[in-house]
Each structure stands twice: as structure tokens, then as C-alpha cells.
Image (cartoon, rainbow, N blue to C red):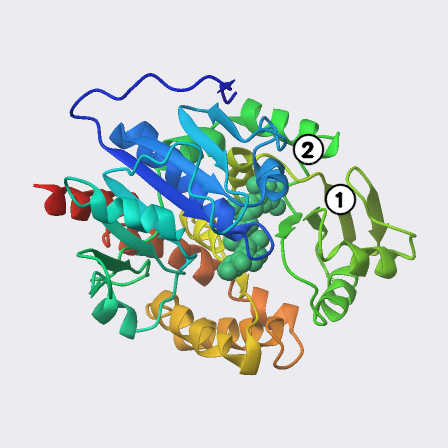
């Protein structure tokens, strides 16, 4: 359980590094999802004194239900959380940290930047960018950008899937937690009973989690699952795709706790869960449909086949990013499996109609690759470790 208090934290020990992380929520959950995950890891694994400034506490509270969205300042899991209530607001205490992270190019308040310039020792200033698997990322990772007015340098920190990038977030305890879940029938049984109110599905069922945006391809896929030869158990976190499921099942809505069945398909709508509980949904499933940035990364660490609904951008700018990720991920696969994954992923992202049978025929190839890919990705080093190492090298 997260620990919550509204008290101000004890002052950090002299050698403890402090970090201010600024997050503006653009939409959905990914912006604050990434920042909250990173904040917790920097605090728990590196001992940093982290202050997280977020402009939308209501969205944040969905991921972290112990958060009180009415407070300007509170402390959860050792992290000071402040409501960053307007672009010019620089935090309740205008103290500049050793390391300053602006997430996803959110603009820092002018007063804060001026205070950074006045600080005796210049802070390490990082712009944490969005994840992209494109090749140019390694070239731009850790490129400095001097400030026009002040003697300050901002460094671009690019998450990525390949060598030379900042990597992606992975907590030290993640693999152990996954292995514990996978190897404990009682943990899994408790999860299923708590999640759908019934025992784990029979072994012949294919369990699929579905976390995606509105998607025209979902109707065709639901029909194919209805007509599938094997039972399909679909776990759908309540959200943007719920309306499509309601329509398919002829229901007025498909809200958390509801179940519906047609043909081989049985679907369960799940309540949105606190972020630390999201991984178990991926571990309990044979195939995960994920989206955005953070759930996409978690699906890779889950070592299960997954299909990515990439965040759609104007002029289809997201499609090269999808292909760049597939180029990394599918590199080691046999040509037929690679081609099927490519076709299915394109169809899921707007180009064509998904063919479930053709895709899932390669299930074992995807399972093998999911495991070997997680090892390859881990070799890049995790984002927090790479960030902490860079910050320390700058503070020497
Ligand atoms: O929510 P997303 O689509 O987020 C984003 C934002 O749209 C952002 O602006 C965009 O730039 C970025 O995508 C690429 O998808 P994402 O990143 O997967 O974030 C979802 C978060 O929600 C993730 O941290 C997991 C969490 N989550 C829970 O905590 N509980 C749940 O029950 C579910 C389903 C998800």
C-alpha cells in the first residue's frame, strides 16, 4: 500500500540528491504514468529526494487512488507531489533541485529557470522525451542545448529500444515479481477471483487483455473471436474501447464488473486499477493489446506476445514509429511470423483488416521472441539507471 502524508519531508541528508520532475498531462494516462513510475524508481532505488509537479491531479489519481486531488502538496511513497496549477507556477517552495527533469518538453516556469541560473551549483537539466524506436534517437540522445539567456544547459534524454539510447523504465524487482506470479498457482487463482469473480479459465482458453484507443478494427476482431475454434477470454479495462464492446454485445454499456458472451468469446470489463497492479493483467494473459508508451513498455517486460496501438499522430506520423519498433522486435523472427505480425499490427493501426487466424498461427514464434527480446532490451540498460549515471557524471 502506498504511504500518504501531507507533512513536509525531512530535509535530505547532505549527500542525498534532490530531483524535481515536471509533468504536464496532454491527454490519457501515459504522461503522468511514465513520470509517476520514474519518480518512484528514482526514490526507491537511488534514494533521490523526488518532488513531482503535475498539472492534472485528477488523471494522476486514477493511477494512484491514494492521491488527494484537492491538495496542493502531499507525500506518497516518499515522493513530494505538488499540484502544478498554472504554467507560471514554480512550485510551492522555489527551491531548485540538483536534477531537474522536464517531461516531454513541458515548459518550465520562467521563475524556476531564473532560479536555476542563480543556483550556486547549476542543476543537471534534462528534457525527458517520448519513447521512439527510430534510428535517429541514438544520435540525439544526450545532446546538449545551451540556454539562450542563462548559463544553463539542457540535455535531451531519449528513451529508446536500441543501443546508445536512454532505454526504457524497468524496476529492479520487476522480473522477480513476474516470476513469483507465474510460479504461484495460489497468487494467480487469487488474482482471477478478485478480477473476474471466478476461477482461472480452463487451459484451452486463450486469455487476451485489450487496452487500446477507439479502433475501427475491433469490430472485425470481436467477430473473429466469437467464431474462433478455441475459447477466448477477453479482459478489457474500462475505457475508450468499452463502447465498441457494448455495441458488439448489444448492451447499453460495458462498465467495470460486467461480463458478456457470444460464441467462443467471453469478455470481462475490468475496473481501472492502481498502476502497480497493471502488470499482473499482462502476466495473466497470453496476448496483450497495449497502447501509448508505458503499457507498451510493460508488455515487453511481461515477456508475452503483444500488439501495439500506437498513439495516433497527424499525417500518419506514427506509422514510421510503429515500423521502427517492429524492426527491432521482429528482427529475430522467422519471415512468416514477422510478416504476420507486421500485417496484423498495421491492420490494428488503421491499414487493413486484422486476420486473427493468420496472426495467431504463429503464437509459439511470438512467445519465443517475447522472451529473447526482453533479454536484448535489458542489455540497453534501464532508463532510470542510465539517467542516474548521466546525472552523477555531470555533478562530479
Ligand atoms: O494512456 P495512454 O494512451 O497514454 C499516452 C498519452 O496519450 C500521452 O499523451 C501520449 O503521448 C503517450 O500515450 C504516448 O497509454 P500509456 O502510455 O500506456 O499509459 C497508460 C497508463 O495507465 C500506464 O501507466 C498503465 C496505466 N494503467 C493503470 O495504471 N491501470 C489500468 O487499469 C490500466 C488499464 C492502465
Mark 2 to mark 1 CA distance (whole Å): 9 Å
Label number found at residue 182: none
Q: State the count of labels.
A: 2
Identify the image quadrant of the C terminus: top left
Q: Is residue 165 above or below residue 83?
A: below
Residue 7 pos. (x, y %): 46, 17
Residue 358 pos. (x, y %): 60, 72
Nearest the viewer among 124 and 254 is: 124
- Residue 291 in sight: no
Determine the image quadrant of residue 353.
bottom right
Residue extending farthest to the left is 396
Q: Is residue 77 above or below residue 271?
A: above
Determine the image quadrant of residue 170.
top left
Determine the image quadrant of residue 131.
bottom left
- Mark 2 crowd level (few <14, some 14–19, many ≥20, 10 Å Cα): some
Label 1: which residue?
268
Nearest the viewer among 297 and 284 is: 297
Label number found at residue 195: 2
- Residue 344 in sight: yes
Residue 2 pos. (x, y %): 50, 22
Nearest the viewer among 345 and 225 is: 345
Query: Mark 2: which secondary structure?
Result: helix
Residue 385 pos. (x, y %): 24, 43
Amino acid at each position: 500500500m502506498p504511504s500518504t502524508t501531507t507533512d513536509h519531508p525531512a530535509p535530505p541528508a547532505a549527500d542525498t540528491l534532490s530531483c524535481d520532475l515536471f509533468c504536464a498531462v496532454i491527454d490519457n494516462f501515459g504522461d503522468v504514468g511514465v513520470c509517476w513510475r520514474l519518480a518512484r524508481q528514482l526514490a526507491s532505488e537511488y534514494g533521490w529526494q523526488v518532488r513531482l509537479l503535475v498539472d492534472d491531479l485528477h488523471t494522476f489519481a486514477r493511477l494512484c487512488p491514494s492521491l488527494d486531488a484537492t491538495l496542493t502538496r502531499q507525500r506518497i511513497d516518499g515522493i513530494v507531489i505538488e499540484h502544478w496549477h498554472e504554467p507560471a507556477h514554480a512550485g510551492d517552495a522555489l527551491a531548485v533541485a540538483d536534477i531537474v527533469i522536464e517531461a516531454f518538453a513541458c515548459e518550465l516556469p520562467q521563475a524556476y529557470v531564473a532560479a536555476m541560473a542563480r543556483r550556486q551549483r547549476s542543476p543537471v537539466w534534462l528534457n525527458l522525451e517520448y519513447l521512439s524506436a527510430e534510428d535517429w534517437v541514438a544520435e540525439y540522445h544526450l545532446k546538449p542545448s545551451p540556454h539562450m539567456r542563462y548559463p544553463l544547459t539542457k540535455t535531451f534524454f531519449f528513451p529508446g529500444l536500441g543501443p546508445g539510447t536512454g532505454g526504457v523504465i524497468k524496476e529492479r524487482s520487476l522480473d522477480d515479481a513476474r516470476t513469483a506470479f507465474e510460479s504461484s498457482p495460489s497468487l494467480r487463482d487469487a488474482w482471477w477471483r478478485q478480477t473476474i469473480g471466478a476461477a482461472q479459465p480452463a487451459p484451452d482458453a486463450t486469455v487476451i487483455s485489450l487496452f487500446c484507443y477507439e479502433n475501427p478494427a475491433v469490430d472485425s476482431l470481436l467477430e473473429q473471436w466469437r467464431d474462433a475454434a478455441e475459447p477466448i477470454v477477453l479482459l478489457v479495462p474500462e475505457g475508450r474501447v468499452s463502447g465498441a464492446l457494448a455495441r458488439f454485445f448489444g448492451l447499453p454499456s460495458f462498465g467495470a464488473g460486467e461480463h458478456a458472451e457470444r460464441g467462443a468469446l467471453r469478455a470481462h470489463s475490468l475496473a481501472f486499477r492502481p498502476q502497480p497492479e497493471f502488470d499482473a493483467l499482462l502476466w495473466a494473459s497470453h496476448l496483450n493489446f497495449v497502447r501509448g508508451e508505458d503499457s507498451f513498455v510493460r508488455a515487453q517486460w511481461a515477456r508475452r506476445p503483444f500488439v501495439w496501438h500506437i498513439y495516433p499522430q497527424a499525417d500518419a506520423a506514427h506509422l514510421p514509429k510503429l515500423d521502427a519498433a517492429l524492426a527491432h522486435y521482429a528482427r529475430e523472427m522467422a519471415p512468416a511470423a514477422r510478416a504476420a505480425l507486421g500485417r496484423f499490427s498495421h491492420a490494428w493501426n488503421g491499414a487493413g483488416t486484422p486476420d486473427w487466424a493468420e496472426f495467431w498461427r504463429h503464437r509459439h514464434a511470438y512467445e519465443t521472441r517475447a522472451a529473447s527480446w526482453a533479454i536484448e532490451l535489458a542489455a540497453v540498460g534501464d532508463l532510470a539507471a542510465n539517467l542516474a549515471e548521466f546525472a552523477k557524471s555531470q555533478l562530479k
